[in-house]
Image (cartoon, rainbow, N blue to C red):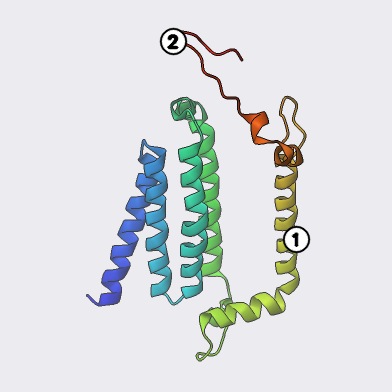
Amino acid sequence: MTVQAFAFYLFATIVVASGALTILARNPVHSVLWLILAFFNAAGLMVLIGAEFIAMLLVIVYVGAVAVLFLFVVMMLDIDFAQLRAGFTRFLPMGSLVALILLSEMVLAIGVWNFADIGPDSRLAIIASDVPNIEAIGRALYGRYLLIFEGAGLVLLVAMVGAIVLTHRERSGVRPQNVSQQIKRRPEDATRNTQPGVGQGIEL
């Protein structure tokens, strides 16, 4: 067995095992950690097939941003996971139906791809052997698909602005911070020295 084959089976086994443990783990923090391990090993698989750009995306974007965000959200929010798992059996038939539909679509797409009456070279984007993978993706992304790329950027910008607007909306019962009033406040107005006797309290 070659080194490449050994690395492939090693990464693939860890990806499948960590993916299963992500779903089966009872602790949500452990699920996120297993997910991070799956992303790292999936990046290793991408390096083996020469897709180093996708490998960097998995490590930088998914591990460095998405998975860490999931981890902080799970650790900071007080979520009742027992209540969430209580409805698992109720939604199991619908979830199984959706999973079967998605699986059938994937099998159909792979079957059409394999049995299409076209040459094998016409399915792939032919690039020169001396052009790196990242450079080829950059040429396609900022050349042929530039308008689509810019459109996706605008959609993300609108989503970001919408999230900011929803976060800073006016809420009732919340006292806003008055910075100028805090700056003008004197120390003697903020504190009061008292000398209560033994057994006496302080009048507010």
Q: Quadrant of residue 85?
A: top left
Q: Is residue 35 left or right of residue 183?
A: left
Number of other residues with Cα within 10 Å of mark 1, as a class: few under 14, some 14 to 19, many 20 or more: few
> Considering the numbered disc 1 on the image, is that residue within a helix, a strand or a loop?
helix
The spot of residue 116 in percent (x, y) is: 57, 70
Name the residue tied to disc 2: 198
| Residue name at image x 29 percent, y 70 percent | 7
Name the residue tied to disc 1: 154
Between 190 and 26, the one lying in front of the other is 190
> Considering the numbered disc 2 on the image, is that residue within a helix, a strand or a loop?
loop
Image height of 137 relative to 175, above or below: below
Between 187 and 117, the one lying in front of the other is 187
Q: Quadrant of residue 5?
A: bottom left
Image height of 102 relative to 43, above or below: above
For the residues labelled 2 and 1, the Cα–Cα distance comes to: 68 Å
**Furthest residue to the top?**
199
| Residue name at image x 51 percent, y 35 percent | 77
Image height of 159 relative to 93, above or below: below
Q: Looking at the image, is mark 2 or mark 1 nearer the viewer?
A: 2
Identify which amino acid the numbered label 2 is placed on.
Answer: Val
Q: Earlier in the sequence, mark 2 or mark 1?
A: 1
Identify which amino acid the numbered label 1 is placed on.
Answer: Leu
Are the residues tagged 2 and 1 within 8 Å (C-beta)?
A: no
Instruction: Give the position of the C terminus as an image quadrant.
Output: top right
Between 76 and 202, the one lying in front of the other is 202
